[in-house]
Image (tube, rainbow, N blue to C red):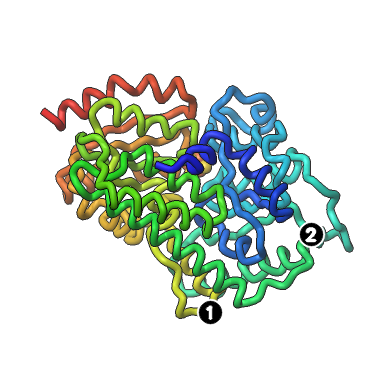
């Protein structure tokens, strides 16, 4: 769809290094959608999502048990191998258990670019920032608590970068993020037609690029591409319309989308963190900026927030919002091994999607390797044939 998006997808580290060299600005890595990346953008820092390599691990297995999420282990391995040596900081939210432990692991195992700035046993310019994202996201005291967490994070950035982050900076960041969300929503709207204007893999590439490049540049490029598609009226291949729901998905395992499409399916919408969960809802421009960012982050419809209810209200609402209007014919769950957040929720979600939407589903358990994705081809083909008749 756009050559630059493809370059970011295939060559993310070189693209970030080039950007850093050209602009002289800082780049921070972050985990998971709930990270308050808008505050980094407001500080004139490029936030990039940390992803893994899919290659056999060289170093991380010495420190993290092999029966934990292969994506997270691969991210740490990439850090330990120096793939992220251009980062000036790392943001770790308390999302799932393994990502939570990245604060300690990254701090102790990944080489930092500069020495700590210690005063009285406290690092005044931390390299790894921990965001204490609450376990429960919807009780009364959560918002004031989380605003305080984000305010501390903002102060750490101000100290570390010798620069105040004003409300104007934060509002500018919110506008840039909302503009990009608007274009991504437009892209997803264009997939409601049959056949869709854009294939599932092309759409995924556009979303993936959005978590690796400056949001304002991404929005401008995406707008240009979508205007062109509208003008030419081009369409993607026809196929059985699939809803893809899954764990972390990056360049390693997104080939599952290609497999689905090569087997006669067409991914038209999704419940992915490199997908609808990263952009679906705009950030309020009516509230004070810090509160607006806190509410956006707390509103992330992540399965990790399943504490008491089997499927919390905001999860189900997100699923309904991202399925309705797409004429979905079947759901594919692509869940990584050891991803407790998704595995715990899956049977309830499968049943609810069947009962309330009448959709058949297929469960695939991924190991975060390219070979593992390829091995799923037969099952995907059978599922799509079953729906397509
Ligand atoms: S894939 Fe699952 S276990 Fe792995 S980092 Fe994401 S939520 Fe956590």
According to the picture, the residue beneath numbered tag 2 turns out to be 125
Is residue 96 found left or right of 90 in the rendered image?
left
Task: Quarter of the image for the C terminus: give it.
Answer: top left
**Visible in this render: residue 310?**
no
Label 1 Cα neighbours within 10 Å, binned few <14 / some 14-19 / many ≥20: few
Q: Give the residue drawn at x 60%, y 31%.
A: 65
Label 2 Cα neighbours within 10 Å, binned few <14 / some 14-19 / many ≥20: many
Q: Which mark is on residue 358?
A: none
Is residue 55 found left or right of 257 in the rendered image?
right
Q: Give the residue drawn at x 29%, y 31%.
A: 261
SS category of the residue bearing label 1: loop
According to the picture, the residue beneath numbered tag 1 turns out to be 288
As drawn, 75 above or below 62:
below
Give the residue furthest to the left: 389
Is residue 178 found left or right of 87 in the rendered image?
left
SS category of the residue bearing label 2: loop
Give the residue furthest to the front: 232
Is residue 274 found left or right of 347 in the rendered image?
right
Mark 2 vs ligand 1: CB below 8 Å: no
Q: Position of residue 242 (x, y in %)?
A: 25, 39
As drawn, 325 above or below 10:
below
Task: Quarter of the image for the N terminus: give it.
Answer: top left
Q: Position of residue 153 (x, y in %)?
A: 66, 64
Q: Give the residue drawn at x 71%, y 55%.
A: 25
Q: If you read the primary sequence from the N terminus, does the residue marked by circle 1 or circle 2 appear first?
A: 2
**Visible in this render: residue 48?**
yes
Q: Give the residue drawn at x 33%, y 46%.
A: 270
């Amino acid at each position: 769809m756009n050559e630059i998006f493809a370059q970011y997808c295939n060559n993310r580290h070189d693209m970030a290094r080039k950007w850093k060299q050209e602009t002289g600005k800082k780049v921070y890595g972050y985990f998971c959608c709930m990270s308050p990346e808008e505050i980094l953008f407001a500080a004139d820092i490029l936030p990039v999502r940390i992803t893994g390599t899919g290659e056999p691990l060289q170093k991380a297995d010495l420190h993290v048990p092999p029966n934990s999420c292969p994506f997270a282990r691969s991210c740490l391995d990439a850090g330990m191998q120096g793939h992220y040596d251009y980062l000036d900081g790392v943001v770790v939210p308390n999302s799932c258990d393994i990502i939570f432990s990245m604060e300690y692991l990254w701090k102790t195992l990944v080489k930092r670019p500069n020495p700590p700035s210690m005063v009285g046993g406290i690092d005044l310019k931390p390299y790894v920032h921990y965001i204490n994202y609450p376990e429960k996201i919807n009780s009364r005291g959560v918002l004031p608590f989380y605003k305080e967490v984000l305010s501390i994070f903002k102060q750490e950035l101000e100290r570390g970068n010798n620069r105040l982050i004003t409300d104007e900076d934060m509002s500018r960041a919110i506008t840039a993020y909302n503009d990009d969300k608007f274009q991504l929503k437009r892209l997803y709207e264009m997939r409601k037609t049959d056949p869709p204007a854009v294939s599932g893999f092309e759409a995924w590439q556009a979303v993936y690029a959005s978590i690796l490049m400056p949001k304002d540049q991404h929005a401008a490029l995406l707008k240009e591409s979508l205007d062109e598609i509208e003008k030419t009226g081009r369409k993607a291949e026809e196929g059985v319309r699939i809803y893809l729901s899954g764990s972390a998905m990056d360049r390693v395992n997104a080939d599952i989308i290609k497999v689905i499409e090569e087997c006669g399916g067409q991914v038209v919408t999704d419940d992915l963190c490199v997908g609808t969960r990263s952009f679906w809802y705009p950030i309020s421009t009516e509230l004070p900026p810090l509160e607006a960012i806190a509410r956006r982050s707390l509103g992330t419809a992540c399965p990790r927030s399943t504490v008491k209810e089997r499927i919390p209200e905001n999860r189900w609402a997100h699923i309904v919002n991202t399925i309705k209007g797409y004429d979905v014919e079947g759901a594919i769950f692509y869940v990584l091994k050891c991803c407790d957040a998704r595995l715990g929720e899956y049977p309830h979600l499968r049943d609810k999607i069947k009962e309330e939407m009448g959709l058949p589903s297929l469960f695939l358990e991924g190991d975060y390797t390219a070979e593992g994705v390829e091995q799923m081809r037969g099952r995907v083909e059978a599922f799509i044939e079953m729906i397509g008749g």
